[in-house]
Image (cartoon, rainbow, N blue to C red):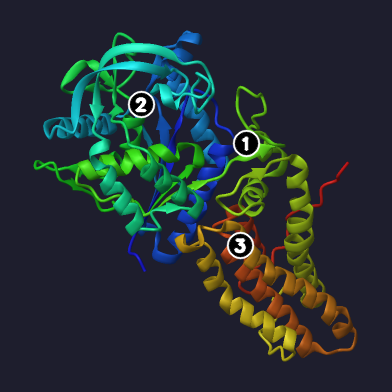
Amino acid sequence: MANKFYVTTPLYYVNASPHIGHSYTNIAADTLARFMRDRIGGENVWFLTGTDEHGQKIQKAAEEQGLAPGDFADKMVSQFVGLWKALDISYNDFIRTTEERHIACVQQVLQILYEQKDVYQDKYEGWYCTPCETFWIESQLTEGNCPDCKRKVERISETNYFFRLSKYQEWLIAHIKAHPEFIRPASRYNEVLSFLELNKLNDLCISRPKERLSWGIPLPFSPEHVTYVWFDALINYISAVGAFDESNRYKSRWWPADLHLIGKDILRQHAIYWPIMLAALKIEPPKTIFAHGWWMIGEAKMSKSRGNVVNPLDMVNEFGTDTYRYFLLRDVPFGMDGNFSEEAITKRFNADLANDLGNLVYRTLTMIEKYYQGSIPDKGEAKDAQAKKIEEKIKSLGGEVSACLAAQADFDFSAGIEKIWELINLANKYVEETKPWNLAKEGRSDELAAFIRLLVEVIREVARKLCAFMPKTAESITGQIGEKAIQKGQPLFPRRETS
């Protein structure tokens, strides 16, 4: 077992409020961080998130609100911090690209690459997309527009600095082929490898003239230029957890990252730009980059321009933190696109959380109250075949969930939760088949005690395994089932009315 686990989310761009996509990535990262803390100890897990605060879009958004870019960024960052608190996101570090520790690291990286001639000056003439802050050549345009956002591009001619992506293309192809776990899921691996084998990389423009954009990190060797926002932002993964020594060797307890979690729309930057930047710096690449899917409303991706963005805080206020977490992790296999609707959450709530989990906990606690005045009976031996099946499932559950959350299984949260629900469903079926009320009526006290005790063991194991996915729910269950006695509360998930 690895002696450390370093997981990151992307740095979220603060030009707009956080949406479901942001919350999805952070909930996934949080679940893995909590799961790994339980396995290898909290001191061996590092979970990094943060915000990306430079660039043209931030400068423009700040101007529109009559604010300095730094003040605008402060205001937007508070929204992200507030959301992570509401979603129980247990990050170890929150980095902002405007922090001195990050700025110093970015400038050192630039200086190293400039001195070894991996960064050079040249004149750029071509097309530029302001919303994406990206340069494009003619052949990349889609009907004359940006291939990413489909908006208009403008013709630009200016002197800039370029990073030699092309120099490392063959190295990256070889690395990807030698490490099938480097880009996941397999569809993304194939997408990146195919692109690299069919196209010659252009060198990356990594600067903007200060006269056009003042809000950015100045280049140490050219103060009249600032750093391209993507080049700046990617460096956070190392600036947050290490430093360069006098010989420009990078030192860190946590690097290489075990997992970069990202949305599929930023795969190119993470799977092409970033590993090449690291290779030029003679730093090992991350172990795995996982690009998950999008949440759609109907057939359309959520976007501010379409006006179909759902505020995660609204969902938390309506359904509760753990129900929201549960839905996002359970409803689709991680990596695929999903359809988001309040109807779908309500369906999951009533079927899985109220009928299955909530019902099992509440009926068990009620029986302990009724038959044992709230004291948990001593363990008896349940001899029937169904009881033995449940006992075996309790023993095997930890390994089954671990296997689902492994990189080899593409961090399949949905399958991991399904394994927990298999135990819940076995226990609910056991109640229906055993009919404990008949055991009580017939005075079969040893069998009743063994039956109740087994249900208690099921619920304790379910709470332990739900800790990573639904921390508040797990805590509530554990609080209600003590070592020797219960403290029954209200039903965990009262059924919701559907119209």
Neighbourhood count class around disc 2 (C-alpha, 10 Å): few under 14, some 14–19, many 20 upward: many
Residue ID for mark 1: 312
Taking the spot 66% from the left edge, 67% from the top edge, the residue there is 481
Q: How far apart are labels 1 and 3 at the CA level? A: 24 Å
Neighbourhood count class around disc 1 (C-alpha, 10 Å): few under 14, some 14–19, many 20 upward: many
Q: Position of residue 339 (x, y in %)?
A: 69, 43
From this view, report whether residue 31 is shown above or below residue 301.
below
> Which amino acid does the dot numbered 2 rest on?
Val
Residue ID for mark 2: 229
Which residue is at the front of the view, 15 or 494?
15
From this view, report whether residue 340 is shown above or below residue 452.
above
Q: Is tag 1's residue or tag 3's residue first in the polypeptide sequence?
A: 1
**Image quadrant of residue 420?**
bottom right
Q: Position of residue 455 (x, y in %)?
A: 71, 75
Taking the spot 74% from the left edge, 78% from the top edge, the residue there is 452
> Which amino acid does the dot numbered 1 rest on?
Pro
Q: Is residue 386 left or right of residue 296?
A: right
Which residue is at the front of the view, 147 or 368?
147
> Which amino acid does the dot numbered 3 rest on?
Ala
**Which numbered mark, 1 or 3, is in the foreground of this view?**
3
Q: How far apart are labels 1 and 2 at the CA level? A: 26 Å
Residue ID for mark 3: 415
**Image quadrant of residue 244?**
top left
**Image quadrant of residue 498?**
top right
SS for callout 1? helix
Camera sees residue 395: yes
Q: Which quarter of the image is occupied by the N terminus?
A: bottom left
Q: Is tag 1's residue or tag 2's residue first in the polypeptide sequence?
A: 2
Which residue is at the front of the view, 78 or 277?
277
Q: Are marks 1 and 2 in contact (CB under 8 Å)?
A: no
